[in-house]
Amino acid sequence: MYDIIEEIRGNVVAIRITGEISDKENEKLSHLVEQKRIAWGRIRVLIAAVHYPSFNSAEDLYDDLGFLVRFSSDIERMAVVGDRSWKTTWVALFGLFSGIEARYFSKEDFEEAWRWLTAV
């Protein structure tokens, strides 16, 4: 389950994940990413995964963010904001296996995540 954080101009896709992402939702997200990619070329992604109960393993993260793997060569960087610092490792592993430059930020550091994501 997800929602768009806000309509963001430019090459950024920003979503809030609040539960497991279904295959149908994965397809919708893939379409959104594809639209941004066509319009902007390389894109950046912000994922807010705060209070997301099914985000309990690296496999869960990889499954729920699978829509990004399809576009990994088109994604410049990804910021993940969450509520558990131990998830840093999972985001790093996702970045390693997907080839996406990825960083994890605590929910208190949302503005820092945004600055890192949008920095030139």
Image (cartoon, rainbow, N blue to C red):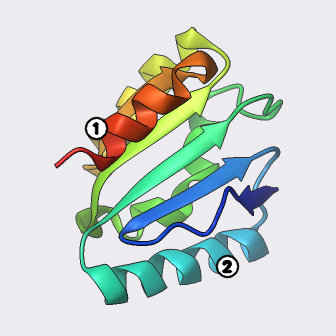
Q: Position of residue 3 (x, y in %)?
A: 76, 60
Q: Please state, as top left, top right, bottom left or bottom right, where the N terminus lies in the image.
A: bottom right
In the image, is 116 to the left or to the right of 14? Answer: left
Q: CA distance from mark 2 to mark 1?
A: 25 Å
SS for dot 1: helix
From the image, tell me which residue sits under label 2. 28
Residue at figure coordinates x 78%, y 64% from the top left: 22
Q: Amino acid at mark 2?
A: Lys
From the image, tell me which residue sits under label 1. 96
Q: Amino acid at mark 1?
A: Leu
Disc ID at residue 37: none
Residue at figure coordinates x 67%, y 37% from the top left: 49
Residue at figure coordinates x 34%, y 88% from the top left: 39
Q: Residues within 10 Å of mark 1 (few under 14, many from 20)?
A: few
Which quarter of the figure has residue 96? Answer: top left
In the image, is 116 to the left or to the right of 19? Answer: left
Q: Residues within 10 Å of mark 2 (few under 14, many from 20)?
A: few
Which quarter of the figure has residue 114? Answer: top left
Foreground residue among 106 and 114: 114
Relative to 58, does residue 20 appear above or below in the rendering? below
SS for dot 2: helix
Q: Position of residue 110 (x, y in %)?
A: 54, 29
